[in-house]
């Protein structure tokens, strides 16, 4: 773990976490399209786990072509996999020919619950696609926070856009994206801040999107899940350091 982050070793447990979506993603080298029917065939097992019937996950590619001197646009539609949504609308998983994506949609409880549900569904997916190599893994947490208007943003966030005093201080729109290296395990941290239209009178609505990505090349399937446990602490530490301590405590109220 990065030396400067080593001091924060206690997992973060908040009474009212601001998480609107948490994601575990694992990518694999693109598989043969024939695997799609086998992935769809998991529907019966998913039904037993309280998931609904699958819906297709598609990708559209637009290509400019010239035929007889006349330009045109061709749209090619690809089936990438299947999406299963839980009946309680709290979980969603995508079984794709290039990877696995699991989401907890709001009402976040604990890392143990989130990771446990993801691992249970990954095991179903991996039995279908194995043996195969792994390419990348990551964890992403999308948070929505409310910051009082007309107050210094530095009282709430430690990372934020800076506006010189000789410019208007009111932001009508804002999108900030930072990409930073992670030393151990070696990877990349992407932090995005997005100002949304107000949802509460007197407060600005801000999305804090923290995305952690790591290479899985050469990792065994078991080792990958061990390293995901390390990322749990890492994502907590980075979240702590993008908020002030006083603001962080408001999520325990």
Image (tube, rainbow, N blue to C red):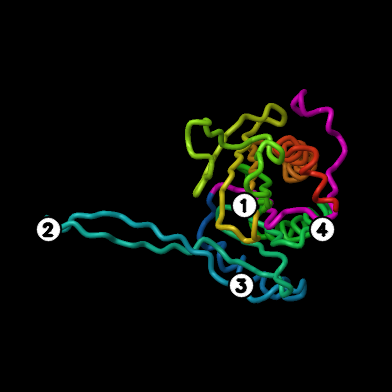
Q: Nearer the viewer, mark 2 or mark 4?
A: 4
- Spot the residue most to the right: 10
Left or right, 14 with respect to 37, comes to: right
78 and 235: which one is in front? 235
> Tag 4's secondary structure?
loop
Give the residue number, with chain letter if any, for mark 2.
68
User: Mark 3 to mark 1: distance in Å?
Assistant: 37 Å
Label 4 – label 3 distance at C-alpha: 25 Å
On the image, which quarter does residue 232 sit in? Answer: top right
Q: Residues within 10 Å of mark 4 (few under 14, many from 20)?
A: some
Q: Which mark is residue 109?
A: 4
Distance between the alpha carbons at the discs numbered 2 and 3 = 42 Å
Name the residue nearer the viewer: 211 or 177.
177
Q: Is residue 253 magenta?
A: no
Residue extending furthest toward the top: 3
Please say whether residue 98 is visible from this viewpoint: yes
Residue mark closest to the camera, 4 vs 3: 4
Chain-order first, disc 2 or disc 1: 2
Q: Quadrant of residue 108?
A: bottom right
**Which residue position is annotated with label 1?**
204
- Quadrant for the N terminus in the image: top right
Q: Which disc number belongs to residue 96?
A: none
Q: Which residue is mark 3?
A: 54
- 94 in relation to 244, above or below: below
What separation in Å lies between label 1 and label 4 (alpha carbons)? 25 Å
Q: Which residues are magenta?
A: 1-29
Label 1 residue SS? strand
Q: At which x and y percent is residue 61?
A: 38, 57
| Residue drawn at x 70%, y 70% as measured from the top left | 89
Q: Residue at x 66, y 39 (%)?
A: 152
């Amino acid at each position: 773990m990065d030396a400067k982050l080593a001091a924060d070793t206690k997992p973060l447990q908040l009474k009212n976490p601001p998480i609107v979506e948490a994601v575990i993603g694992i990518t694999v080298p693109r598989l043969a399209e024939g695997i799609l029917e086998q992935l769809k065939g998991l529907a019966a097992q998913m039904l037993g786990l309280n998931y609904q019937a699958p819906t297709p996950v598609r990708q559209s590619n637009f290509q400019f072509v010239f035929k007889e001197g006349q330009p045109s646009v061709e749209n090619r539609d690809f089936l990438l996999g299947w999406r299963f949504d839980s009946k309680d609308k709290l979980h969603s998983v995508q079984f794709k020919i290039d990877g696995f994506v699991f989401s907890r949609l709001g009402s976040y409880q604990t890392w143990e619950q989130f990771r446990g549900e993801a691992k249970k569904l990954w095991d179903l997916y991996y039995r279908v696609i194995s043996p195969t190599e792994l390419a990348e893994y990551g964890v992403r947490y999308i948070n929505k926070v409310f910051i009082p208007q007309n107050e210094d943003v530095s009282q709430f966030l430690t990372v934020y856009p800076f506006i010189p005093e000789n410019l208007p201080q009111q932001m009508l729109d804002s999108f900030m994206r930072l990409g930073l290296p992670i030393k151990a395990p070696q990877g990349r941290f992407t932090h995005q801040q997005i100002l949304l239209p107000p949802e509460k009178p007197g407060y600005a609505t801000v999305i804090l999107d923290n995305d952690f990505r790591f290479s899985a090349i050469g990792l065994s399937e078991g080792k990958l899940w061990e390293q995901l446990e390390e990322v749990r602490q890492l994502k907590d530490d980075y979240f702590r350091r993008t908020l002030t301590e006083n603001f962080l405590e408001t999520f325990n109220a």
